[in-house]
Image (cartoon, rainbow, N blue to C red):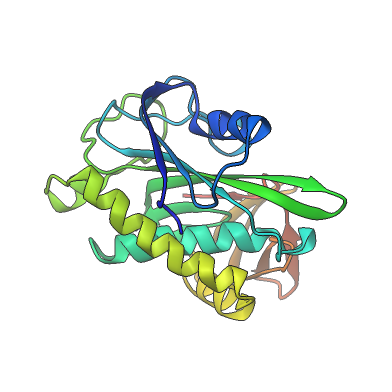
Amino acid sequence: MIGSDILFFEILPSTNTYAANLLRSKEVPEGTIIRTMFQSSGRGQMGNGWESESGKNLLISIILYPKTTSVSDQFLISMAISLGISDFLDKKLSGCKIKWPNDIYVKNDKIAGLLIENSVIDNSIISSIAGIGLNINQRRFLSDAPNPISMSMITGKEYNIDLCLEELSEALDKRYYLLISGKYNIIRNDYISRLFRFREWSYYRDSKGTFKGRLISVSEAGMLIIEKSAGESAEYSFKEVDFVP
């Protein structure tokens, strides 16, 4: 399903924005991919930008209709897509983890980002746009992002980006099928077990300051659950807690 139709553009402001406008204008087959060589206004989580050298990486948005997924379970979409990216990377390199909520890391460096935008009507998910930026062949990053990395930087190889898209689409499709088939426990368990710093004692920062804790789970609503060294646990929404390097 995913990648059965690909709309390619040399340059776009944002693949997610284009996909959203396309959905407002006509019916679009599920699994359609919007792909560009360069985004002039690429977007990440919470309005963050996304740096990508033209023609070096994968910049795509996927149009999905996960109507069997309830609004309360919408974080499962993010989980499934994050796992699909991770499955693809597992075939190319080792050490891939998911940094909550949906950044993809290799060891301590960020190799991919994900932006999920859901359209909800009457407590039902009508459509979902999954925007993915995956660093493949870029060797030099100019922004002030602290830790970008690419497949090529890790392995020293140059990759065929079209083939990478084909393989990524296949990996994403398998995870999306689990989602629409209601295999939620598989998705949740696989996602939690792949989390960056899972069950490792590390330092975090919230509104009260820096503390030591270990990431033990993620709630069904997508909140991060951290056990603190004093024994109690706390739940955090997006941007309520930072990972301290």
Q: Quadrant of residue 75?
A: bottom right
What residue do we see at 42% from left, 46% from top?
A: 5
**Of all residues shown, which one is farthest toward the left?**
157
**Of all residues shown, which one is farthest toward the right?**
122
Q: What is the number of callouts on the image?
A: 0
Nearest the viewer among 107 and 28 is: 28
Asked if residue 194 shows in the view, the reply is yes
Q: Left of 207 or right of it: where is 155?
A: left
Residue 24 in the image: x percent, y percent? 67, 32
Residue 90 in the image: x percent, y percent? 30, 66
Asked if residue 48 shows in the view, the reply is no
Q: Left of 10 or right of it: where is 13?
A: right
Q: Quadrant of residue 8?
A: top left
What residue do we see at 75% from left, 48% from top?
A: 208
What residue do we see at 37% from left, 41% from top?
A: 147
Nearest the viewer among 217 and 25 is: 25
Residue 234 in the image: x percent, y percent? 75, 64
Nearest the viewer among 21 and 79 is: 21
Q: Left of 237 or right of it: where is 177?
A: left
Residue 129 in the image: x percent, y percent? 58, 44
What residue do we see at 56% from left, 56% from top?
A: 100
